[in-house]
Image: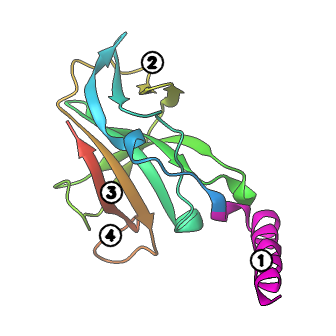
């Protein structure tokens, strides 16, 4: 009899979590961040991954955590990003331009002005920028980024939390 009560309580809790906290069921697939190729496609930087680019979005840190597919070029460091959408409506796709001294866990990501747009399609993610002619992609990273309050050491409050892959 206690077994039936335990099952009933478990189902009730799971139902409550599903309807009242849908972000608890966010998606994460490690293969979505394993970079297999990074180069130019029609003059735009792109990354190809093992899984599906942009499918995973972070729910661990709510609005304070997002994923960045980052392109290092001679024109700067650009990223197409994926985050939990407003009101927990997943996902939100965006772009960023970063200034970073060294790609390592804990590094501050200074921010520039990004005027491009992200394009996620199957295994690829692109940074589309019509005003810049890119010549090559020298390095690519898939990152988990955390946002916190800004301080004297990091004006943006954005830090590299995890480096999944680089190419």
- Give the mark nearer the N terminus: 2 vs 4: 2
The mark found on residue 110 in the picture is 3
Q: Position of residue 12 (x, y in %)?
A: 83, 75
Q: Residues within 10 Å of mark 1 (few under 14, many from 20)?
A: few
Secondary structure beneath disc 2? loop
Depth-wise, is mark 1 or mark 2 nearer the camera?
Answer: 1
Q: Which residue is mark 1?
A: 7
Direction bottom: furthest residue:
2
For the residue pair 109 and 68, the one nearer the viewer reads as 68
Q: CA distance from mark 3 to mark 1?
A: 50 Å
Which residue appears at 40% of the width and 59% of the height? 145
State the CA–CA distance, disc 3 to disc 2. Answer: 23 Å
Question: Would you say 143 lies left or right of 9 here?
Answer: left
Q: Quadrant of the C terminus?
A: top left
Mark 4, residues whose alpha carbon is within 10 Å: few (<14), some, or many (≥20)? some
Provide the residue designation for mark 2. Answer: 130
Q: Is tag 3's residue or tag 2's residue first in the polypeptide sequence?
A: 3
Q: Residue at x 72, y 52 (%)?
A: 89
Please state which of the two labelled residues, at mark 3 or mark 1, is closer to the viewer.
1
Question: In the image shown, does 13 or 59 lie closer to the viewer?
Answer: 13
Query: Viewer-proximal residue, 78 or 123?
Result: 123
Instruction: Give the CA separation, mark 1 to mark 2.
Output: 56 Å
Q: Position of residue 1 (x, y in %)?
A: 83, 88
Q: Secondary structure at mark 1?
A: helix
């Amino acid at each position: 009899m206690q077994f039936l009560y335990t099952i009933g309580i478990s189902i009730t809790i799971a139902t409550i979590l599903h309807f009242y906290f849908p972000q608890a069921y966010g998606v994460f697939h490690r293969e979505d961040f394993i970079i297999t190729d990074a180069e130019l496609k029609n003059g735009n930087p792109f990354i190809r991954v093992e899984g599906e680019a942009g499918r995973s979005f972070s729910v661990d840190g709510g609005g304070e955590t997002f994923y960045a597919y980052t392109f290092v070029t001679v024109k700067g460091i650009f990223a197409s990003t994926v985050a939990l959408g407003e009101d927990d409506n997943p996902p939100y796709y965006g772009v960023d331009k970063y200034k970073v001294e060294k790609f390592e866990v804990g590094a501050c990501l200074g921010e520039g002005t990004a005027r491009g747009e992200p394009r996620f399609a199957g295994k690829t993610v692109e940074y589309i920028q019509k005003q810049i002619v890119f010549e090559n992609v020298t390095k690519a990273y898939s990152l988990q980024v955390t946002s916190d309050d800004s301080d004297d050491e990091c004006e943006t409050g954005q830090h590299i939390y995890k480096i999944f892959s680089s190419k």
